[in-house]
Image (tube, rainbow, N blue to C red):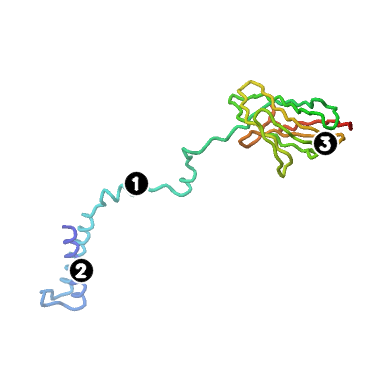
Amino acid sequence: MATLLALVGLIAMMVGLISLVKPLTALRIRTRAMGLGVLAGGLILTMIAGSMVTPSPSTQSASSNPPPSQEQAQTQPSAHQAAPREVPKIEISGQFDPAILLVGQKLVVKFGISNLNDEPINGVRLFSDGPWKKFTIVNVMPNGTYGSTFLGTEFASGMVIPPGETRWLNIIAYPTEPGNYELTFIPHPLDGGDFTDAAGERIVIGGKVAVLPR
């Protein structure tokens, strides 16, 4: 209905405009006053048709719920975002047994590692700096491995340390040359990351061993 009224109104406006320039006797519009009346009538019909047009429900729904902006989408927290991992804390002590020995004599480097966390520690890795080329490494206990990296010599054990308990990691080696050797160790979790002490400080442990000639 609104479309029909709008169409009739537009036609009437066009006829009225033409009759203002030249009377249309064929349509019985003989004066400009009559043409002006036709033009006004067409304008009124067009306005009535416009008032009858209302927005569709789908249009109203879309306009009342605009999509979130890119900035809003970026600031919304993700349900799958993982919480930051806590750095596990340990207490570690070391001992050379013996600290003075002869070339070819057995050396055991002992580490007591205490778990200060509420979760178990699943394995320990020790990065060591020192003249390990002067030693023959034969074993890492319990169930350990060793090898060389760009950081130095690496010792690892898959031992599990329950919360609040202490486990021992032992490195067994034999010196091949006499000398006074300084060895340092930095402990890390076997699956990566770092250990800290109870105060949250990075841990470096080490000492000296004297090897005498036979």
Which one is earlier in the sequence, the residue at label 2 or at label 3? 2
Report the mark closest to the observer, 3 or 1: 3
Residue 160: x and y, percent?
Answer: 61, 26
* Residue 136 quadrant: top right
Label 3 and label 1: CA atoms lie apart by: 83 Å
Which numbered dot is residue 176?
3
Label 2 and label 1: CA atoms lie apart by: 37 Å
> Does the residue at mark 2 contact the one at mark 1 (Cβ under 8 Å)?
no
Residue 144: x and y, percent?
Answer: 66, 32
Q: Nearer the viewer, residue 115 or 22?
A: 115
> Does the residue at mark 3 contact the one at mark 1 (Cβ under 8 Å)?
no
Residue occupying the point 81% across, 38% down: 134
Q: Residues within 10 Å of mark 1 (few under 14, many from 20)?
A: few
Q: Amino acid at mark 2?
A: Met
Label 2 and label 3: CA atoms lie apart by: 113 Å
Q: Amino acid at mark 3?
A: Thr
The residue pinned by badge 1 equals 64
